[in-house]
Amino acid sequence: MDKLLVHGGTSLSGAINISGSKNASLPILAAALLTEKQVIIERVPDVSDTNYMLQILSALGCEVERYSGTVKITAANIHPEAPYEIVRKMRASICVMGPLVARLGKANVSIPGGCVIGDRPIDLHLKGLQGLGAEVDTEGGNMCITAEKGLIGKEIDLRGKHGPTVLGTDNLMMAAVLAEGTTIIESAACEPEVVDLADFLNSMGAQIEGAGTRRITIQGVRSLGGTHHTVIPDRIEAGTFMVAGAMASEDGITLNRVREDQLTEATHKLIEAGHLVTFNEAGNSVTIQPGDQPSGCAITTAPHPGFPTDMQAQFTAMFATSPGISVIEDTIFPQRFMHCAELTRMGANINVDNGSAIVHGVDQLSAAPVMASDLRASAALVLAGLRAKGSTEINRLYHIDRGYEMIDEKLLQLGAKVERLRGSI
């Protein structure tokens, strides 16, 4: 397995382009199953999660062509069987359920395995599809979802224990576009990635209103056509590099291909922590400079438009060397603090208890061999390594390759001293 060696102490400078959103790309790629016409999707990041999704689409019978961030998909002749050996590698593969049932009246998809950051049940996905009239039979680790007479629009509440479900909203929205009549999704997720999927579907001929609010209305249509779509920037990658600029730069770094309106919470917390964040007039480029008097602060994750749980680990890494005390509470994934034990190995002073962490900032981190436990935890360890004294070896690099396109190359572009150590599984 690959490792990343991060040699700390070098100041970052310069500019990079932010990639297309991984979390927006996955359901958009799955939505290509809804039409027999060709769809063209630009700025699809070259990360392992999107690669797995394209493998699933190919296995379902799609014609897939990929080059330089552009994907062309034609789903003219598809079947409903999603293979376990690929599905098991990525939880977001359940995104194919809604499109397959809507288009073919049937979907056979393996139940996704457990998640290292906590319980992420799919009951709300199934509740939504059953609400539209689908029948669900679970046997041998597989879900067989059928709607022999088609799906019928209905009002469905997707409220969950820890707030709205993003993928559940995506799945139901994709199923509903070909359902008969009107579907109303209450307690819908409001994330920008949901809005991007709705924009993609509407460009294919769907009739969706209210995406980005808690109430989405979908008027079913008989069929969808082809389209050409550009994926939104990855706000989590942008936020991660914004933290890098605050932690490991003297004069600041610039990030291009961003959207200011999607980085509000990360921007506010960086400013509250004493750092400088400056967007250009168009809001598509941002410069981050470390402040002269940084400080800790409090963060509580919440569904959009609140502070994203996917940025919690990166800010924890920043607070590890920020003067004062910071308090981080994760209300969405209370178990998502495994990075704290690894940061402690590097000299951080962090106490974790019952879904929250108290961080006492220290003057200096020191390099140590550390283990990535999930995608965002691995990013936090990279950030800590940039600031640490010595060379930090980050193991299980496949986690970061799930969602950060060429992160080592982008860090090198900013002047960091990192090297990928190739290995075999």
Image (tube, rainbow, N blue to C red):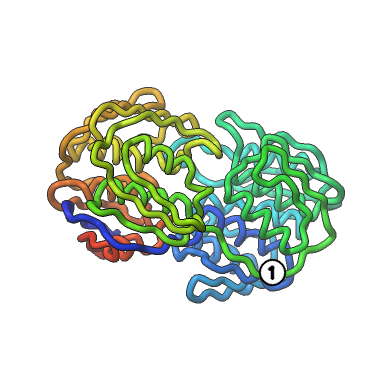
Q: Nearer the viewer, residue 335 or 284?
A: 284
Image position of 350 with respect to 288: above or below: above
x and y, in percent, of residue 162 in the image: 55, 31
* Quarter of image, res 80: bottom right
Q: Residue furthest front?
A: 281
Point out the residue furthest to the top here.
Answer: 354
Left/right of residue 339 with respect to residue 417 in the rendered view: right
Q: Which of 34/318 is in front?
A: 318
Residue for point 69% across, 67% down: 78
Q: Quadrant of the C terminus?
A: bottom left
Taking the spot 69% from the left edge, 52% from the top edge, the residue there is 98
**In this rendering, is residue 184 above or below 29?**
above
| Residue 21 appears in the rendering | no
Where residue 147 appears, x then y in whole percent?
Answer: 79, 50
Position of the N terminus by quadrant: bottom left
Q: Is 284 left, or right, of 325 in this rendering?
A: right
- Residue 118 image point, x, y percent: 46, 36
In the image shown, does 256 or 39 lie closer to the viewer?
256
Q: Looking at the image, which is closer to me, 49 or 182?
A: 182
Q: Mark 1 highlights which residue?
A: 227
Tell me, yes or no, if residue 28 can be seen here.
Answer: yes
Number of numbered tags placed on the structure image: 1
Q: Is residue 391 left or right of residue 50?
A: left
Label 1 environment density (alpha carbons within 10 Å; few <14, some 14–19, many ≥20)? some
Residue at figure coordinates x 68%, y 63% from the top left: 33
SS label for mark 1: strand
Q: Is residue 206 above or below residue 77?
A: above
Three-letter code for the amino acid on which mark 1 is drawn: Thr
Q: Position of residue 133 (x, y in %)?
A: 80, 43
